[in-house]
Amino acid sequence: MTRLLVIGLDGATLDLIRPWAAAGRLPVLSRLMDAGAWGPLRSTIPAASFPAWTSLVTGVNPGRHGVLDFTERVPGTYRVRFVNGSYRRVPALWTRLSAAGRRVAVLTVPATYPPEPVDGVMVSGFDSPLATAIDGSFVHPRAFYRDIRRLVGRVPFADFQEVTTGPGWHTGALARLLDGVERRTKLAAWLLERQRPDALMVVFGESDTVAHHFWRFHDPRSPRHAPSPFAGAIARVYEALDRAVGALLAAAPPDAAVAIVSDHGSGGASDRVVHLNRRLAECGLLGFRRASRGRLAGLVRAAALRAVPRRLQGALVRRAPAAAGRLEGLHRLAGIEWSRTLAYAEELDYHPSVWLNLRGREPEGVVDPAAYRATRGRVAAALAGWRDEAGRPVVERVWRREELYAGPFVGRAPDLVLELARLDGYSPSCLRSVGPGPALRRLAPAEHGGGKGRGMNGAHRRDGLFILAGAGVRRAGELGPADIVDVAPTVLALAGEPVPAGLDGRPIAAALDAEPRSAPDPLADTAPALRPFDDDETRDLEARLAALGYLEPGRTSE
């Protein structure tokens, strides 16, 4: 029975690992690359953590597993609600291994709250992009939480605000990121040594966070570059993760199969800002109200987030959810005149996309369902034809949702998903319009730091990575790109389990010593019991999301 060690490095990129490994700065990862097979791993579109990690652990696309973002639309409204791991409609790796009689340990994989009753131990990942640390509700069996507290104390995610990154912020953030790597490593190594699971999967999020906030210090070519003592911060986190991989290899059986994976890559952001709703307005597809209350609400909200300490923001929103909801409505969508709007964007920086204002789906929809295809084509053409002052395209590709996804949940996706064009290799920021104005602009130098919701200076890239080594892995060296849905069948094959028929992904055959076996899927109709967040949890999530800039307070209130 082959033992498995799967280590996720959120946002890790070969653009950094390849040169640093060659220079001797990442000796453990370098050794694994030399001994096994590795290459780029093509992520979902958009390359966002919830759909990407869920695709990685299920082997199917978001249209089949049902997790397309950390929120989903509330039918018949312009609001959204939070999703969690129970919304996943396809079994994950640990479910399949448990059903096959394998004992598993699963640590901090995104989109896995609430924990599933696996044969072994499960510590959920962040239930939203803003959970700050695990508590007992994140753990199965719950009694194991006492052991975690005794061993490592808190197991943090990003337990600091990421909206305002002023003087002193980077010192504290880097220290907390390095501490988070150390705590997670200690817990995972203890599980390997004491619990001796047949398979362990752990995800480190620090590689993603450090790239978002420290890229401009690392990259002298960045249009936002600033000389700084933090020029080596990203390298320090990657070196800490390299040591973490080494510690886990030392704690694992010497004949284990090892997979290092990332959900997407990372790169630099440009100083260009794209305002999608203003572009739609320019093309006669969206109308703004004349009143400027939305802009005022945005200023009030931003001032409130700066003034209220990080750990008190949740209590503030929980005690005044109606006021927070009104503020959010003014800020986000109240500036749109729905009777004059054919299409609109939520203007999420990590997920540029457009919805039609469809009659019968949106509460104030104006687009006749019979005109859906024609209207969507008109909107797509307006975005595809967008050019900047130098004649360069602003949008690289406009995808219709059925071009990206297949399955019963395609209807949960936006009608159009965009890939914005990079400028000299740097990604633009998609920020909120909050009323009329220029659809394209440049960030002022004072904005180059860019906290969450304000255009972070590091951005996602679609290509993550895979590194395979150990038992069952061929010493194949660098391989061509694999798809993120190929990871689950590859890991199952390395475990000696048959690959279920019907997955979207295929084993990375060039990396494997033996021909993978296939079999009918014994869990084809199995999915977690749906467990939506209750009202208290939703309010708490709203507050935490707002604190890090993913969303304004009250956005999800129904």
Image: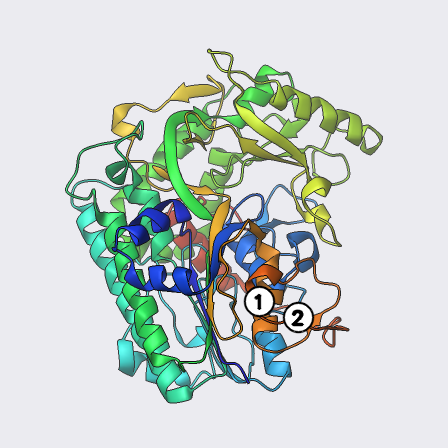
Instruction: Please give left or right for residue 226 compared with residue 190 in the image.
Output: left
Tag of residue 485: none
**Residue 286 in view here:** no
Residue with the mark numbered 1:
512
- Going 48% across and 64% down the picture, which residue do you hit? 475
Q: Amino acid at mark 1?
A: Leu
- The residue type indicated by label 2 comes to Pro
Whether 340 is drawn above or below 57: the answer is above
Residue 549 seen: yes
Which residue in the rendered view is the most extreme toward the right? 370
- For the residue pair 361 and 459, the one nearer the viewer reads as 459
Task: Look at the picture and state if 1 lies above or below 18.
Answer: below
Inter-mark Cα distance, 1 to 2: 8 Å
Q: Tell me the quadrant of the picture where the N terminus can be found.
A: bottom right
Q: How is the image coloured?
A: rainbow
Label 1 Cα crowd, 10 Å radius (few <14 / some 14-19 / many 20+): many
- What x and y, as percent, mark residue 253? 41, 82
Q: Position of residue 234 (x, y in %)?
A: 27, 49
Disc 1 on helix, strand or loop?
Answer: loop
Helix, strand or loop at label 2? It is loop
Q: Which residue is mark 2?
A: 516
Cβ–Cβ under 8 Å for marks 1 and 2:
yes
Against 514, residue 151 (above or below) is: below
How many numbered callouts? 2
Q: Is residue 275 above or below residue 471?
A: above
Q: Residue at x 17, y 38 (%)?
A: 228
Q: Residue at x 74, y 53 (%)?
A: 407
Q: Residues within 10 Å of mark 2 (few under 14, many from 20)?
A: some
- Tell me which corner region of the image, top left, top right, bottom left or bottom right, holds residue 508: bottom right
Q: Position of residue 413 (x, y in %)?
A: 66, 45
Task: Describe residue 222's horizontal placement relative to residue 433 as left or right.
Answer: left
Q: Nearer the viewer, residue 126 or 470?
A: 470
